Image (cartoon, rainbow, N blue to C red):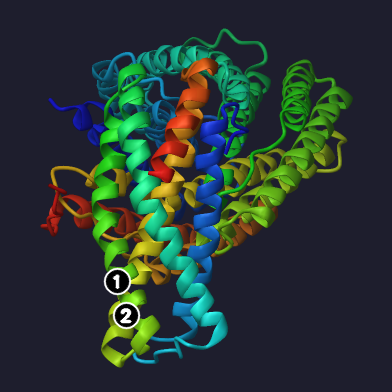
Amino acid sequence: MGAQARLLDPTIPYRYFAAALGFHILLWALIAAFPEDAAVFAGGSGPALAALHSLTLGVLTATAMGAAFQMLPVATGRPLRSTRAARIASWFFIPGTGLLIWGMAAGEHLPMALGGFAVALGLGIFLVLISEILWRARGFEPLGRFGLTALAALLVGVALGFVLIMDDDHGFLDQRARTAAVHLIVAGFGFMGLLALGFSHVLVPLFALAQGVPAGESRATFALSALGLVAGAAGVYHGVWFLAAGGAFFGLLGAALHLRGMARCLATGMRKNLGVSALLLRAGWGFLVTSLIVGLVTALGFFEMQGPRLFAFLALFGWLLTFLLGVLQRILPFLGSMNATGAGTKPPRPSELAPEGLLRAHALLHALALVLVGTGIGMEAALPVRLGGIAGLLGAVIYAGFALRIWWLIHGRPHATIKERP
Amino acid sequence: MFALRLGILRSLHEEHVAMLAVLERLENLLAANGPRNPPDATEESVAKLLADVAAALGDDVTHHYAFEEARLFPRFAELADPGIPEMLRQEHEIIRPLAERLVAIIAQAKTDGFTTATWAEFHGTGGEVAEREAFHIQKEEMGLLPALDQMLEEDEDGPLQMAYVEMKGG
């Protein structure tokens, strides 16, 4: 195996991205098919829980794994300790997620437990591999700080998830609903949220070709976000609602500081036209702020059951999913071209890989899905949720088409050869 | 992008920034004049831009690429992994003939102006160079420069800067 293949084995990130695209379709299909469950979801197994984990594990975590395995060695110059281990992690994680989701949808404990165990094993391998890179690359301060803390949150989130699965059959938890809420906060804001903030320090300046966020500002963002996370989780678990509100407040301050840095990157970067992906990134950031405001207001007692539902929906679907789709829209052509440069072939041009029309259609349907499902959850009405699910499903199919098109242009189509200099 | 510690890497970064500025102006010219609509190559702003494009691409293709290939890629391969420099070297091989062709069309346009045929070729090649070079710079700014900044010793900086100056002077 040559050096090119050793570093950039495309099957590692692509298997995670392919899984994410499949689970993206599945999650919207579940919402479209079972809108009543999603509109009034209050925990417990069923299609809504399955759709939720299709998003969190199937889309968000799978993408984070693929992106981390591919991007971190490139960004830090520290190769993965073992590409074989990264493959083995996928053998546990991807089918495990499928089994877990099936168990959740059907309300069957055994597939849930087996799937959860496989997911935990896959995530455990991921955690060891990535924390080792981040530890060796501590000089990349923001990546290390946000990344290692996100991985610690992943450990806690997975442990809580496993406890919840076991409790589903044995019923030993006194505070199941609060444990589930802490699981959501730690996994959503702690793992995925901090990882998104950390990766943004590299990716957004890279996309815009801008100077990075100053170290002091990044440290302050991290401190506020971590404080918000700990206070929010502790407040929710102990039922101390002013502490939970304080967590949301500190989270808002951290988000405001982060967004100021990101806005500066986009405004001062050498590349001004970032296309549809910049729209999705900005929309995702808007949802981050909105979700924290809803979380704050809910903690202060202004909402009934719609509050926690809307908070979770805005954070997971509005912020994390929208942001991730925006990022993926830019890094898929990027990674595709990295993998295409080799063996004396001339890869397609970047503009061939990312046609604007397709991306605009997806963004429009995604926005429509968020508005309709959000409205349905707010009104506890199934019809808008179903219509939103259908819009999301169409968008997800288009997005999968966009990714498959890149795959075809890179790997399926014969390329022109390039001439080596004598 | 990260704040770089070593002078040689800062020099390369500054050249990337300058190159992107020229490419952005080139893209604006191409957007304003379709492939069948050649601009007046003697018009002051167009002539200045063409001269800047030729200078930037000429220098980038000869010195910048050559220095990276001779001095930085082998060190990166030695210290980390050969995959990234190999990929970047292959991108150089793709961009090099395109840039050389663009510079040749510019030289011809300086004396004869653009015909419909030469402008159409310039339009296609220029667009491709701008896209591929910007993408290439993104990769170097994300992977090569920050990682080298972490891995190279400070006492390597002076000799590398000297070697680059010599390469440009020679």
Q: Check the image and name the residue furthest to the front.
A: B170
Residue B99 placement: quadrant: bottom left
Image quadrant occupied by the N terminus of chain B? top right
Amino acid at the residue labelled 1: Ala
Q: Position of residue A66 (x, y in %)?
A: 37, 33
Nearer to the camera, A163 or A169: A163
Q: What element does badge 1 sit on?
A: helix
Q: How much space separates mark 1 and mark 2, taking CA atoms? A: 6 Å
Q: Residue at x 78, y 15 (%)?
A: A238
Amino acid at the residue labelled 2: Gln
Would you name the residue on which mark 1 appears? Answer: B104
Nearer to the camera, A420 or A261: A420
Q: Position of residue A105 (x, y in %)?
A: 40, 35
Q: Residue at x 37, y 38 (%)?
A: B67
Q: Position of residue B51 (x, y in %)?
A: 47, 71
Would you name the residue on which mark 2 appears? Answer: B108
